[in-house]
Image (cartoon, rainbow, N blue to C red):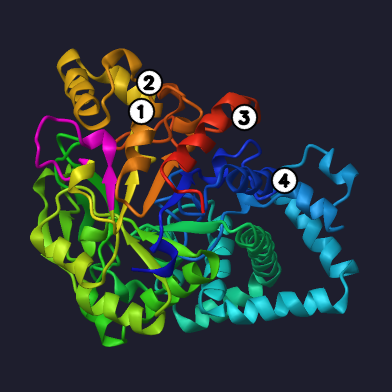
Amino acid sequence: MSPLLDRRRAGVLLHISSLPNGDLGEDAFRFVDFLARIGATVWQTLPLNITHADGSPYQGLSAHAGNPAFISLRGLQKQGLLTEEDLNLSLDCDALIQKAHQNFQRHSCPESKADFISFCKAQSYWLDDFSLFISLRKHFQFVCWHDWPIHLRLHEDNSIKKAQLDFAHEIALIKFTQYLFFKQWHALKVYANSKNIALFGDIPLFISYDSADVWSQSHLFKLDENLNMTVVAGVPPDYFSLTGQRWGNPHYCWKTMQADGFQWWLNRIRTQNEMFDMVRIDHFRGLQAAWEIPVNKLTAIYGSWVEAPGEELLQTIKSHFPSLTLVAEDLGIITQEVDALRENFNLPGLKILQFAFDGNPDNPYLPEQFTENSVVYTGTHDNDTTLGWFSSLNDEQKQLFYSYLKVHFGLDQQTVKIPQSLIEIAFASKACLAIIPMQDILRLGNEHRMNTPGTIEKNWQWQFDWSQLTSEIEEDFVETIKKYHRNH
């Protein structure tokens, strides 16, 4: 087991966008202070990448780039890159970052400029293609790269070199924007680590088709001779959807990736390893076998499982990053082969308590089924809030939950409190790490849900307000952490 998970810990799930200001500014540091104050030692976020129009952090424009929307403009003002007057001009984020870039070029000291150059060199393995991709994407009115002129679509060397010259100014601005993001993120990480808070990241297994990665390295994906997808990713019918989920991501051409020692994956892990103390692999089961849906099928019902070289990939990652702490998101249809892959690398799996109380004594999400090498949640970003979940249960389902609490905690129905009772079950469990979504700490209902899988509207928008965090709520949470010996 990883040293980060060799003792009982408590953590909180909150995306950066869900902070009151939704950025890496004062609220992010204040949130670290809150975690340190209550005795929690893990802050889990969702992926930090640039989203498409639907806002999903699981459909990013790059496997590496950070979301400029998270850059704190107030932080840039404190650095002297913007003025108070600039912030009061009602300019959008892009315009203000452009101003910051101009000020950086004109007024920054040689050391700062050298630091920027060093960043660009160190990150060139992804930053060069990404910055050109974003420049071209903007030039072509944000249409998918597949609709660009054919010489650019095919990433032809001569055309790429010409475009790098033609868009040199735009490329420099995009690189500077990424520099600002990573400087602010690493400042937050240093601060969190100084307070004994580990940052817990999230890697979506698949990449969006309309991304810098697929455009610049199309040979790594299952595309036809015209660079169209032949199959797309998703999952078969499950708890969340009767028709499954058709995510629409391209599948990997694993044989090509194996041929160069999984270099694309190693680069991806390298970026995440620099940003986080531990990382969750979303849809881990796809490393054993992934659900491939023919591109012409409109639902996920018509897919099939296709095996992946997960054993070889994870061994390669482990050999290059021996101290990296990985967590397997092993939800959904899990087979013995998937369990064996996770166990071979001693990776913790996830346990979701909202899935547990169906009356089946062998339900794998019941706490008595856990091993210590687990991460338990009341619910994740894909679940309803615990208050919303409980409100949606029928009387029979509620009685199953009450019966469990009576047998295992000695609680009568009248003494059960939601979400507090589910939080206590999580903290009392064997799992080495218990993560509670901020909505459950704040005791919020389903109108505060982060995401509803299979839908595209009103997701990823939730933000909390500090006024919701009352002294009573904070004190109760502190006592719960202490009660179950997770306050180290």
Q: Is residue 123 left or right of residue 79?
A: left
Which residue is found at the position 15% from the left and 17% from the top? 396
Q: Is residue 403 above or below residue 217?
A: above
Tell me which amino acid carries mark 3: Asp
Query: Which stretch did the figure color magenta?
Result: 350-366
Q: Earlier in the sequence, mark 3 or mark 1?
A: 1
- The residue that appears at 44% across and 30% down in the rendered structure is 458
- Crowding at label 2, few (<14), some or many (≥20) Cα neighbours within 10 Å? few
Mark 1 vs 4, N-terminal side: 4
**The magenta stretch spans residue 355:** yes
- How much space separates mark 2 and mark 3, taking CA atoms? 23 Å
Give the image location of residue 42, x and y in percent.
50, 53
Mark 3–mark 4 contact, CB under 8 Å? no
- Name the spot of residue 409 as percent of width and height, x first: 27, 30
Label 4 vs label 2: CA separation? 33 Å
Name the residue that disc number 2 marks. Answer: 417
Residue at x 40% of width, y 68% of height = 325
**Distance from Cα at disc 1 to Cα at disc 4:** 32 Å
Q: Is residue 283 above or below residue 345?
A: above
Q: Which residue is mark 4?
A: 26
**Residue 252 in magenta?**
no
Q: Which residue in the protein does label 3 denote?
A: 465
